[in-house]
Image (cartoon, rainbow, N blue to C red):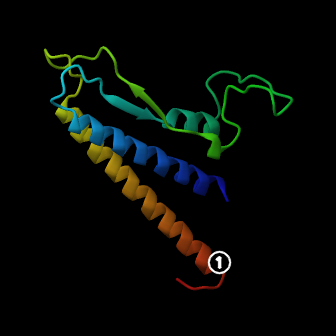
Amino acid sequence: MDKAWAAAKVSIGGLSKRLEATAQNLANINTPAYARREVTFEDQLNRLLHGPDRLPLVTTDPSHISTLPRSVEAVKPVEERAVGELVRWDGNGVDIDIEMAKLAETRMSYQALFRLLARKAASYRTVMGGGS
């Protein structure tokens, strides 16, 4: 599997988790003291693909702890609660406008990745002699 395909696969998994978190946030918009959920994975993926901001720890053995994922497949979405972000007087941290914007952005990214993968699969078929 090439790096672009693996990165797209990881991104689709992360975006799927983000869609779940956003749906959960919207479902709990009227729940007092609800702390919204946030899913991130792009920073990990960018550091792995483009290099870190700082020098990574040098590992000479597979059992050493690395500061970066060892492969694209090792990038996992991180889900966190945004505790302390109060939007309303009842302690709820969900802003419907922000969540709807995240939902639209995530959906568009998801669709773009699927189109990219479909084109890549079509080019693989062409290369293998299957036509388009």
Q: Where does the image place residue 122, in percent across and percent down from the top left? A: 53, 74
| Left or right position of 40 against 72 | left
Residue drawn 27% across the image and 34% down it: 25
Check disc 1 and give the amino acid type: Val
Determine the image quadrant of residue 45. Answer: top right
The residue under label 1 is 127
Give the quadrant of the N terminus.
Answer: bottom right
Residue drawn 65% across the image and 33% down it: 51
Asked if 38 appears above or below 130 in the picture, the reply is: above
Q: Which is more toward the observer, 59 or 89?
A: 89
Q: Which is more toward the observer, 86 or 126?
A: 86
Q: Where does the image place residue 53, in percent across and percent down from the top left? A: 61, 24
Q: Where does the image place residue 84, in percent across and percent down from the top left? A: 30, 14
Residue drawn 42% across the image and 27% down it: 80
Q: Badge 1 local density, few (<14 within 10 Å), some, or many (20+)? A: few
| Left or right position of 2 against 33 | right
Q: Spot the residue most to the right.
A: 60
Determine the image quadrant of residue 75. Answer: top right
* Number of numbered markers: 1
Determine the image quadrant of residue 105. Answer: top left
| Left or right position of 32 against 119 | left
Residue drawn 86% across the image and 29% down it: 60
Q: Which is more toward the observer, 87 or 122?
A: 87
Q: Secondary structure at mark 1?
A: helix
Q: Where does the image place residue 132, in percent across and percent down from the top left? A: 52, 82
| Left or right position of 59 against 27 | right
Asked if 10 appears above or below 58 in the picture, the reply is: below
